[in-house]
Image (spheres, rainbow, N blue to C red):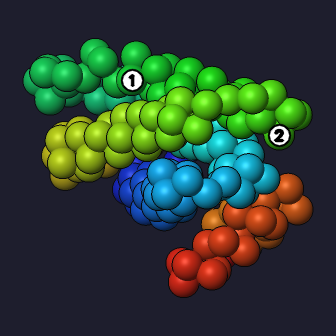
Amino acid sequence: MQSEARTLMKELREDHRNMSIVLELLDGVVEHASSGKDPDFELLDEIMRYMTVYPDAVHHPKEDIMYAQLRDQRPDLAEGGLDSVLDDHNEIAALGSALRDEIEAINAGAAVRRQKLIEDVSGYVNRLRSHMAWEERDLFKRIDTMLDDEPQEFDVAKFEHIKDPVFELEIEAGFRRLLSSLKQAGQPTG
């Protein structure tokens, strides 16, 4: 199925807003743990499960499709930094998976130093925020320029049916704690 590029860009920007909201929750976990309190490990588990099943598995691959087309259609706009996007996505996914494994191990009874958890969560949050900021101020603008010059369509059929399990209308049961935390924080959800 072909997707009109402007609609896809709107979805990607919305995903970034949603991911930023979830990263704010992770900031709260870091603050809580930094003050010597035990974080809500079940919430942490849901957050990292969400980050690995939607942003890493759906959002970033959609971006990769757009970036590949930008490289093919407008090589003049693809210079300077575009070659690192796929590596960035892979690195962020690896950090997210490692953090998710660490949290699952803690929930299973493994001992992990509080400072290591704080550093790992902070490192993940900072890396993802930095990447999204670069995309917003640079890469998305390049794609907008390409779309201003000529309408494009992207084949994202394998992702079209996958809805955001937290911010879409039908919330998956496995993310109820995350949804509750977002509502308590006054954040909009589906």
Q: Give x and y (percent) for residue 115.
A: 51, 35
In this rendering, is residue 59 above or below 148? Answer: above
Q: Which mark is residue 152?
A: none
93 and 6: which is toward the camera: 93
Above or below 39: residue 185: below
Residue 146 in sight from this viewpoint: no
Q: Residue at x 58, y 38 (%)?
A: 114
**Residue 185 in which image quadrant:** bottom right
* Residue picked out by circle 2: 107
The 10 Å Cα crowd at callout 2, few under 14, some 14 to 19, many 20 or more, is some
Give the amino acid at mark 1. Answer: Asp
* Residue occupying image coordinates x 86% and y 33%: 109
Please report contact status of discs 1 and 2: CB closer than 8 Å, yes or no: no
| Helix, strand or loop at mark 2 | helix
Q: Is residue 78 left or right of residue 59?
A: left
Is 155 positioned to the left or the right of 149 in the image?
A: right
Residue 108 location (% of width, % of height): 88, 34
Visible residue check, residue 5: yes
Q: CA distance from mark 1 to mark 2?
A: 28 Å
Q: Quadrant of the C terminus?
A: bottom right
Above or below, 68 relative to 170: above
Please name the residue that numbered disc 1 is placed on. 88
SS of the residue under disc 1: helix
| Residue located 61% across and 72% down the image | 182
For the point 67% across and 29% down, the residue is 112
Precedes in sequence: disc 1 or disc 2: 1
